[in-house]
Structures are given as structure tokens and as C-alpha cells.
Image (tube, helix red, strand yellow):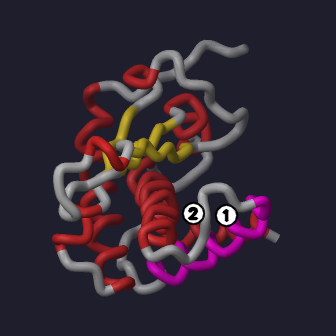
Amino acid sequence: MATERYFLPEHMPVLDRSVAIAEEAISDFFSFSSSHWKRHPFEVKTLKESRGVAFPDRALAHLLRYDNSLGDKKSGQDSHQLYRICLHDHNILSRADDEPGLLPLMVYVMTHELVHIARFSRHDCSLLADRKEEEERVVHRLTRNVLDSLPLPGLCSVVENFDAQAT
């Protein structure tokens, strides 16, 4: 395996900005209020922060959901789950070399993962679904729709590259 590349401190502002852009775009598209994210919290971890987690080969990120047991809940308002978006730094940085920049690529990746969370939280799909490829096509289509009117230089090219892979 080639030398692993990790997000460096100078990448963190781009990562933070991409999360903010994606969260706002998802909130607008699905008409989520800020309370939605409180009920369905998520965190983002880089490869270095996620030591010990198995990563799928070529994926740019993967999503984990942690659930509290019902016995640990104190009330119906308790959040009983946490989503963790695990970034695959080396795959993202390698792909960013071929894209128009890290920010548009990260906006796509974060939006894609937040679409998954939106679908799970709305019960539009199940984490246990047998139709992973079909779900990925649906999520890509929704991600494209969410990002369609976002005026970010280079984003259209990134989405088109993912379109080519999704077919």
C-alpha cells in the first residue's frame, strides 16, 4: 500500500466549511430545523482519529450509527443514536488531486453522508437494507438535487464525475 496521506491542520478549515455548507444545504432541501440535528447528532472523524475502524477499500467515507439501549434513555427526548461520518483521508486526498479542489469534493462527500442520515432519520430506508447499491444510487441522485443550485466553483465537475460512476 502506498504511503497513507492524512488530513493536515491546513485541511481542517476546508473540512469545517464543507460540513457547514452541506448541513445548511440539507436543512434547506429537506426543510429541517436546527432541532433536527439535535435529535439526530453526527460527528466527523478523520482517518487518524478513527484508528482501529475497518475502512472499505475505495470509499471516500463511511457512516456508522451508534445506538443507546432503550434502558439507558431517561425520557422520550433523549437522543438514542449518534451518527459518525468516518472520512478516508488517503482516498479523498488522492481523488482531490484529480478534482478542481478539495472544498467542492468535500462538500459533495459531506452532503452525500448527510443525505444518508436524513434518509435514516426520516425512515426512508433502513441501515439493514439488502439493497446497498440501489440505496447508493438514490443517495447520489438526492445529493445531486441538493447541490444542484449551490454556486460553488468546481462543484458541478465533482458531481458530474460521481454521475459517471453511479451509472
In magenta, the rendered stretch is 130-147
In reply to whether residue 138 is colored magenta, the answer given is yes
Residue 70: percent from the left, percent from the top?
35, 49
Q: Given the image, on which type of amino acid does mark 1 rest?
A: Phe
Q: Nearer the viewer, residue 40 or 136?
A: 40
Residue at image coords 51%, 63%: 116
Residue at image coords 66%, 56%: 128
Q: Are marks 2 and 1 in contact (CB under 8 Å)?
A: yes
- The answer to whether residue 104 is left or right of residue 125 is left
Using the rendered image of the protein, determine whether residue 154 is visible from the camera's viewpoint. no
Note whether 69 is above or below 6 in the view shown.
below
Residue topped by disc 1: 162
Residue 1: mark: none
Residue at image coords 38%, 79%: 150
Residue topped by disc 2: 158
Residue at image coords 61%, 47%: 98
